[in-house]
Amino acid sequence: MPAYVIASVTDARDAEKLARYREGNTAAVEKHGGRFIARGGELETLEGDWPALRIVIMEFPDMGAARGWYESDDYAPLRELRQSASDTDIVLVDGV
């Protein structure tokens, strides 16, 4: 069953670092069987107070593959790079 990683960026402090992060993360996601469903683009809040500047949705084959990406040695330095350049909330949700 597919699993989805949803990232909500609420503050982006360093565009250069985030560009490097996106480059590296593209390969890391693919390496773990994932693909991007949404990666930025126009954002419209339909209900509630969602202060996101950017939403990213990644699809993985299952929860294990998604966790494998997030906990991998190849993603660890990218995660640190992202954390130094932005404030991002990330959730993992099982698909149907």
Image (cartoon, helix red, strand yellow):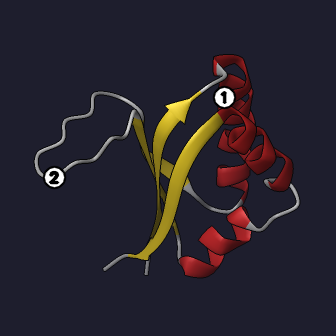
Residue 18, numbered circle: 1
Front position among marks 2 and 1 = 2
Question: Which residue lies at the image location 66% right of the left edge and 28% below the top edge?
Answer: 18
The disc labelled 2 sits on which kind of residue?
A: Gly
Q: Position of residue 56 (x, y in %)?
A: 45, 45
Up the image or down, 87 lies above or below 19; here it is below
Q: Position of residue 48 (x, y in %)?
A: 16, 52
Q: Position of residue 39 (x, y in %)?
A: 45, 37
Q: Decide if residue 62 is on the left or right side of residue 95.
A: right
The disc labelled 1 sits on which kind of residue?
A: Leu
Up the image or down, 8 lies above or below 81; here it is below
Residue 26, numbered circle: none
Q: Position of residue 72 (x, y in %)?
A: 81, 64
Q: Label 1's element?
A: helix
Residue 48, numbered circle: 2
Question: Which residue lies at the image location 73% right of the left edge and 50% below the top edge?
Answer: 28
Q: Quadrant of the C terminus?
A: bottom left
Q: Quadrant of the N terminus?
A: bottom left
Nearer the observer, 41 or 34: 41
Q: Decide if residue 42 is on the left or right side of residue 30.
A: left
